[in-house]
Image (cartoon, coloured by chain):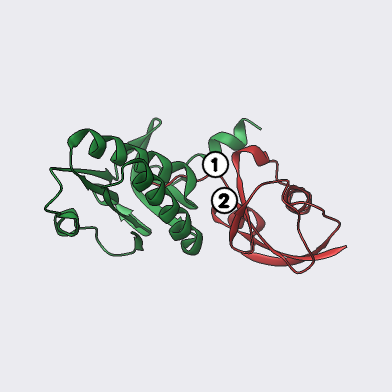
Chain colours: A red, B green
Amino acid sequence: MKTITVRYFAMFREHAGIGEETLSVDADTAVDVFHATQHRHRSTEPSGHCKVAINDVMADWDSPVSDGDTVLLFPPVAGG
Amino acid sequence: MIEMTTAEIRPDELRQQLFDPAAGAYCGFEGWIRNHNEGHDVLRLEYEAYEPLAITEGEKILAEARECYPHLKAHCVHRTGMLEIGDCAVWVGVSSPHRDEAFQACRYIIDQLKVRLPIWKKEHYADGHSGWVNCERCAKSA
């Protein structure tokens, strides 16, 4: 198990009801963390539409996560 | 250079930063808040950004444009917070020796900004409802 801080933005934050939480998760990659949060908050957003960052660096869903990392979950973006 | 701001965007002032004696062309893009989207009457838009990564990713996009067009000067400003109909939400300005690369670079930058920057917008509708742009649609397609 790893201790991961997860930050939620926009729709994800509203759905979760919080902006940030620290979880103890069995996760090797960013998508594992994403799935854990979906299970926790009963969300069905597909990861393919979303983006992820680890410790303030844009990452891929298969990027590895380490104990103590902060994972930022970005719902589909819509700038401009 | 890319900036995020809660203040009004003033393109006429911003474009002056792009003046260059070697530039023969300037191209600017302004994204405005419109009063409708996908059949909804929109009253206002609320922008949220994760600024540290919006800046980092935005600088990467500008660097990519400068790599393609070596004599390019480029600048972008994006609003956050609550915006009203007609407000300028984003401005992209470029200057270059010739118009062709100015048009192309400006188009490249705004297109990339829209799909890569961690920025979200919530529409507030005349019927009292609200919705996150792109999010509701993709939740339905899940």
Residue B108 - label:
none
Labelled pair 1, 2 in contact (Cβ < 8 Å): yes
- Residue under disc 1 on the same chain as residue under disc 2: no
Instruction: Answer whether residue A45 is visible to the viewer in this image.
Output: no
* Along the line of sight, the residue nearer the viewer: B75 or B120: B75
Q: Amino acid at mark 1?
A: Cys
Q: CA distance from mark 1 to mark 2?
A: 7 Å
User: Which residue is identified by label 1?
Assistant: B135
Q: Can I make out residue B76 in this image?
A: yes
Residue situated in front as seen by the camera: B30 or B100: B100
Which of the pair A46/A56 is nearer the observer? Answer: A56
Q: Which residue is denoted by mark 2 in the rendering?
A: A11
Relative image position of residue B68 (x, y in whole percent)? 36, 41
- Horizontal side, residue B140 vs residue B52: left or right: right
Query: Which residue is at 24% across, 61% downward?
Result: B8
Label 1: few (<14), some (14–19) or many (≥20) C-alpha neighbours in 10 Å: many
- Residue A46 is situated, as x and y percent measured from the top left of the image, at 67, 38
Q: Quadrant of residue B97?
A: top left
Circle 2 chain = A
Q: Mark 2 belongs to which amino acid?
A: Met
- Number of numbered discs on residues: 2
Query: Residue A5, located in which quarter of the rendered image?
Result: bottom right
Instruction: Measuring from the top left, give residue A69's x and y in whole percent.
Output: 72, 65
Per the image, label 1 sits on a secondary structure element best described as helix
